[in-house]
């Protein structure tokens, strides 16, 4: 995949430099107190995690693209989502995601409040009932599972990686294989990932999964290979209702800037301190 | 595709990517082993540093137990990694904000420390064997002696200084290593079940009791195998140690659990559903009841009645065995339990490990047995028991 290749190229330069720096430090005698230094460094970095995690300086070799000039962000207008799941299908195809019910870079949740009940019934395309309705794990559909029951309120919520400003996944990655680019996208260098899945645990949104075919972690990249060529992410491209909005916040007139400016937007699980960059309109108290 | 992963069934709503449990039974074994390392080292240090004379019979053996467990600790991690051949990436380019990045350094530091201390402790034995034996084994001991055959009182004093210093450094080393394992879990804000400031302390204290319990079990078994009588003073010393640290562990676990329930943050309903359902057998019955309350009661009764002789040996052995089970269940309930509660706060997953798989029960079992197979060899090479050592080369410690 082209997006992955880009992340790997940028990261390999970075790792090479880090390796050299690190080895020269070791030669200087630092190895004797390496453990203490790393421990202390870790503790300090944990304490100062308020600063954004970025890769710092190494510019990717993408023709005609300068990542310092962009600040990507994503918007979801849940009031427009009709749960057609074309986004899920497009994402799977575009990014060669495993075609089963356990690996998703993006998914859609359905919230249904039945009359007389306080809590919503929540499901997504991976629910066995929905898989039975679609006929296969590689086909995505919401079953009409509530039949004749009286529905008080119902809505869909598209989900994806939040590309947080303070990503917990980046914080915990032991090798730096996952990192935040200058333009605000959290990506993974699949050639450097050791597959420990600490990042999968750390993500509060369940946005990461382990790709058993390549033995590495995977997640949404906002289709980095497309956006750096001026295209939209695949899910945004195929959404028939415009529920998904993507753009550059560096451009005040962009759709996403206008979306954030003209709406009261929310982010998911703000209490985690991760500061997500997917902004929602039309969600509900039970959406987490 | 189905053979590539082991998907879990779920109830309620869980995120689609949660249906494959990321950290499997191998990650249950990993903290269990590091715990045994820290616990066994604690017993050794109680003698080497704090002068608990009654623990003298097991002090050297404890070091070997600690070392054998420690060299196996990276194995479950390597088996779990998607790319174990890249494991050194974490050392070459450590990402300093990651708690995991420290592991390789902390573990390497501690292994070196353990090797050094073991060498000093067993140096008289090594020298003696190097002088007595011929052939390959003789060569092995001669290489290990590093050319120093000096066992004079002055040299022994020098060795004892080193042993003392290494044991002192080893206390924060071993405990730091295990406290850090608790930190790996406790520092994650994504899981309410793990996210607790008490997690490192709970891991640490449960580590101490598991290591002590392991020494009780192995010591009694070894006495039976060697056909020698169990040193009751030593056994009582370990039983007291076990009792004391168990009280702390139970208190910490109780406070942590009470805080979680009392705080009752978002998702508590599903946590309570978990606690009252799937957790009843592994937590309340096995970990808390059979593995903690029962041994505490038995040990308290023994201390109160001043029981001695074979009854004491049997009862302490049985209690220690149950404690080992309890700590294994504690690791399971933390590692697996945390992942069975969905991050949505709206659903539960059910993890059933496969038997034959790279991350299956068989692999975990083999990893768990490996230190003891190593230990069988090590006690033959480095005899840790006093009855076979001679006054010429016995280290007074």
Image: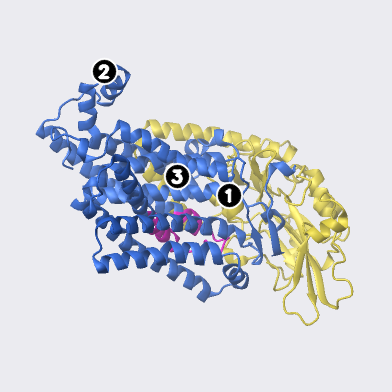
Chain colours: A yellow, B blue
How far apart are the two marked residues, 2 and 1, measured between alpha carbons? 47 Å
Identify residue for label 1.
B24
Q: Which dot, 3 or 1, sits closer to the camera?
A: 1
Q: Position of residue B106 (x, y in %)?
A: 40, 44
Tell me what residue is drawn at x 63 percent, y 70 percent.
B270
- Secondary structure of the residue carrying tag 3 is helix
* Left-right relation of B268 to B140: right
- Secondary structure of the residue carrying tag 1 is loop
Front one among B206 and B196: B206
- Secondary structure of the residue carrying tag 2 is loop
Q: Quadrant of residue B305?
A: bottom left
Front one among A27 and B131: B131
Q: Position of residue B223 (x, y in %)?
A: 29, 44
How far apart are the two marked residues, 3 and 1, measured between alpha carbons? 19 Å
Q: Is residue A4 visible?
A: yes
Identify residue for label 3.
B103
Circle 1 chain: B
- Near mark 1 (Cα within 10 A), the count class, few <14, some 14-19 or many ≥20, is many
- Near mark 2 (Cα within 10 A), the count class, few <14, some 14-19 or many ≥20, is few
- The region drawn magenta spans B182-207
Q: Is residue B156 above or below residue B8?
A: above
Q: Are marks 2 and 1 on the same chain?
A: yes
Choose the circle earlier in sequence order: 2 or 1.
1
Tell me what residue is drawn at x 23 percent, y 37 percent.
B121
Q: Position of residue A166 (x, y in %)?
A: 58, 56
Q: Is residue B262 above or below residue A133?
A: below
Identify residue for label 2.
B134
Front one among A221 and B108: B108
How far apart are the two marked residues, 3 and 2, measured between alpha carbons? 40 Å
């Amino acid at each position: 995949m082209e997006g992955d290749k880009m992340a790997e190229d940028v990261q390999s330069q970075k790792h090479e430099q880090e390796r050299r720096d690190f080895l020269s430090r070791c030669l200087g005698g630092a190895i004797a107190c390496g453990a203490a230094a790393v421990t202390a460094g870790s503790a300090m970095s944990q304490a100062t995690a308020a600063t954004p995690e970025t890769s710092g300086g190494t510019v990717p070799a993408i023709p005609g693209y300068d990542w310092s000039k962009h600040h990507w962000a994503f918007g979801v207008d849940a009031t427009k989502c009709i749960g057609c799941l074309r986004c899920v299908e497009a994402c799977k195809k575009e990014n060669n995601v495993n075609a089963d019910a356990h690996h998703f870079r993006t998914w859609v949740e359905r919230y249904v409040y039945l009359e007389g009940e306080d809590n919503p019934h929540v499901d997504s395309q991976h629910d066995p009932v929905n898989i039975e309705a679609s006929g296969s794990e590689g086909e995505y559909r919401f079953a009409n599972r509530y039949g004749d029951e009286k529905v008080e309120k119902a809505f869909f919520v598209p989900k994806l990686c939040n590309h947080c400003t303070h990503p917990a996944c980046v914080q915990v990655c032991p090798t730096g294989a996952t990192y935040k680019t200058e333009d605000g996208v959290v990506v993974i260098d699949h050639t450097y990932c050791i597959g420990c899945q600490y990042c999968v645990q750390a993500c509060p949104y369940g946005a990461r999964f382990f790709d058993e075919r390549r033995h590495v972690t995977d997640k949404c990249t906002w289709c980095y290979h497309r956006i750096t060529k001026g295209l939209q992410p695949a899910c945004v491209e195929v959404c028939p209702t415009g529920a998904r909005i993507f753009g550059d916040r560096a451009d005040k007139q962009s759709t996403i800037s206008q979306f954030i400016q003209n709406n009261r937007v929310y982010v998911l699980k703000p209490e985690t301190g991760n500061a997500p960059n997917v902004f929602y309109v039309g969600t509900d108290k039970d959406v987490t | 595709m189905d053979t590539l992963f082991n998907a879990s069934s779920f109830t309620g709503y869980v995120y689609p990517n949660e249906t494959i449990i990321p950290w499997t039974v191998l990650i249950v074994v990993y903290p269990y082993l590091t715990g045994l390392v820290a616990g066994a080292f604690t017993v050794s240090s109680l003698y080497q540093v704090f002068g608990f004379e009654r623990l003298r019979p097991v002090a050297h053996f404890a070091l070997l137990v600690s070392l054998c467990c420690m060299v196996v600790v990276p194995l479950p991690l390597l088996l779990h990694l998607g790319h174990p051949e890249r494991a050194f990436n974490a050392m070459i380019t450590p990402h300093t904000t990651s708690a995991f990045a420290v592991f390789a350094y902390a573990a390497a530091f501690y292994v070196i420390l353990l090797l050094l201390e073991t060498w000093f402790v067993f140096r008289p034995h090594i020298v003696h064997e190097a002088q007595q034996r011929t052939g390959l084994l003789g060569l092995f001991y001669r290489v290990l002696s590093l050319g120093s055959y000096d066992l004079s009182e002055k040299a022994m004093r020098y060795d004892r200084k080193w042993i003392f210093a290494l044991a002192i450094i080893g206390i924060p080393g071993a405990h730091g290593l295990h406290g850090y394992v608790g930190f790996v879990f406790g520092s994650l804000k994504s899981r309410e079940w793990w996210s607790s400031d008490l997690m490192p302390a709970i891991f640490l204290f449960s580590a101490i009791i598991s290591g002590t319990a392991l020494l009780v079990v192995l010591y009694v078994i070894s006495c039976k195998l060697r056909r020698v009588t169990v040193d009751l003073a030593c056994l009582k010393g370990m039983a007291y140690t076990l009792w004391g640290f168990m009280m702390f562990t139970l208190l910490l676990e109780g406070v942590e659990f009470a805080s979680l329930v009392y705080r009752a943050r978002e998702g508590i309903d599903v946590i309570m559903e978990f606690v009252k359902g799937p957790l009843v057998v592994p937590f309340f019955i096995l970990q808390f009841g059979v593995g903690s309350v029962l041994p505490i009661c038995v040990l308290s009764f023994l201390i109160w009645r001043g029981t001695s002789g074979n009854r004491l040996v049997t009862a302490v052995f049985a209690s220690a065995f149950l404690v080992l089970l309890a700590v294994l269940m504690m690791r399971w309930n933390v590692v697996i339990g945390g992942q069975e509660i969905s991050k949505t706060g709206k659903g539960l997953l059910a993890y059933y490990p496969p038997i034959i798989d790279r991350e299956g029960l068989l692999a975990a079992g083999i990893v768990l047995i490996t230190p003891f197979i190593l230990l069988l060899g090590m006690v033959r090479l480095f005899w840790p028991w006093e009855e076979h050592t001679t006054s010429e080369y016995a280290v007074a410690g």
